Image: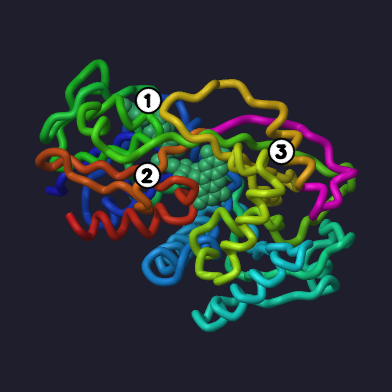
Amino acid sequence: MKQKAIVIGAGIVGLATARALSLKGFDVTVIEKTARAVGASVRNFGMVWPIGQPAGELHSRAERSKAIWKDIADSTGLPYKESGSVHTAYYKDEWVVLQELYELFKAEGRAVELLDQKGVQKKSGAVNPNNLIGGLYSASEMIVDPRIAIATIAAYLTEFLDVTFIWGKAVSAVEANRVYDGSAWIEADLIFICSGSDFETLFPALFAGIEITKCKLQMMRFKSNIPDYDLGASLCGGLSLIHYHSFKAAPSLKALAQRYENEMAEYLRYGIHVMVSQHHSGELTVGDSHEYGLTHDPFNREAINELILQYLRQFAQISDWKLIQSWNGVYPKMTNGSSHLFLQPSDHVYILNGLGGAGMTLSFGLAEECVQQI
Ligand SMILES: Cc1cc2nc3c(=O)[nH]c(=O)nc-3n(C[C@H](O)[C@H](O)[C@H](O)COP(=O)(O)OP(=O)(O)OC[C@H]3O[C@@H](n4cnc5c(N)ncnc54)[C@H](O)[C@@H]3O)c2cc1C
């Protein structure tokens, strides 16, 4: 008889864990407190983003995750776009950093190209040519629409891997070999807690001592008035260069970060860097800001959206874009520099959480590695 596993939480981390456990031979049940996933996993850009991960373990994990995304998408018909990404340079110091990154990434064997102004325009007709120096193109980045993707993965796990889902039940207690879902105790040989930003409800005393916080991000969705509008590659402005770990390898990044600190203090105050991705529906997701703390004001700041739009106009031509939605999302983020939190608070019980802004990029690979370890 198969051993039983329970996964708490049906965000991307819980789904990736359910997949890995099922492939390992467990009979898996996922328990999710809401009627459908509405957490960080459906509020993000849908960027599967290897370029943001430093060489070695994290970059390999991102590539492995991307391969799993493609497998699932090919099995289910989930639309995805291998858009690639372009980081744009409008200032000389940004261009220097992109040149350095190009050399480093090329040496690592990544699929990158250094593009002049015309080259960037070929990758994306939406790019603003005014003052554009050039860009770094990477072919590896992929876009899904998270609002469809997360529901599709749950359906895939049910259909292909016999995973059972219990929706609309909050787990309020976890003991070795059983969880309480509000109406009954459910037994299992193994329990994985993947509760995302609601990390303190279960094992509160443990979390009080863990270096973890919550990050609130503001996002917007647009639609172009032009029929069949094609963004081309996903676009990023210079500020993204100080956001992703993989870019820290560029020797001139510190000087660039210093200039941003001097000239763009308001952007740095709210952790703003600006990217745009396009989904199969044609809609465009734009973000984001990063505000850290354990408790967040639930309301969006209009000033942040204004700053994001102002910066977006520097590198994208958006006059035909219409704002159709804005929202915010919250993810848990380790404050000690770790890429995630994986620990065993008691026998048979594991916690997998804290993937920060890279859950869509890393969860599938990470879950496989964690399940392999147990
Ligand atoms: C605005 C935004 C943009 C982002 N962009 C990207 C991106 O482009 N690329 C990328 O790689 N990453 C991105 N991220 C990060 C990524 O979305 C997160 O890392 C990831 O979604 C975290 O997944 P999760 O499963 O841990 O959390 P969640 O998606 O929040 O899922 C946790 C689930 O657990 C459930 N739960 C909690 N407690 C219980 C309980 N007691 N009982 C039952 N269920 C429970 C919750 O209801 C929830 O559904 C972004 C995040 C945000 C917010």
| Viewer-side label of 1, 2 | 2
Tag 3 secondary structure:
strand
Extent of the magenta region? 312-329
The disc, 3 or 2, on the residue closer to the chain's N-terminal end is 3
Note whether 5 is above or below 206 in the view shown: below
Crowd class of label 2 (few under 14; some 14 to 19; many from 20; radius 10 Å): some
The answer to whether marks 1 and 2 mark residues whose Cβ atoms lie closer than 8 Å is no
Q: Give the percent coordinates (x, y) of residue 198.
A: 37, 29
Tag 1 secondary structure:
loop
Note whether 291 is above or below 235 in the view shown: above
Per the image, the residue denoted by label 1 is 33
Residue 14: name its quadrant: top left
Q: Residue at x 83, y 37 (%)?
A: 322
Q: Residue at x 44, y 45 (%)?
A: 356
Q: Residue at x 55, y 59 (%)?
A: 49
For the image, the number of numbered tags is: 3
Q: CA distance from mark 1 to mark 2?
A: 24 Å
Residue 334 shows which numbered tag?
2
* Mark 2 CB near ligand 1 (8 Å cut): no
The disc, 3 or 1, on the residue closer to the chain's N-terminal end is 1
Disc 3 marks a residue whose amino acid type is Arg
The residue lying toward the viewer, choosing from 325 and 7, is 325
The residue lying toward the viewer, choosing from 256 and 176, is 256
Disc 2 marks a residue whose amino acid type is Met
Q: CA distance from mark 3 to mark 1?
A: 27 Å
Per the image, the residue denoted by label 3 is 221
Q: Quadrant of ligand 1?
A: top left
Residue 353: name its quadrant: top left
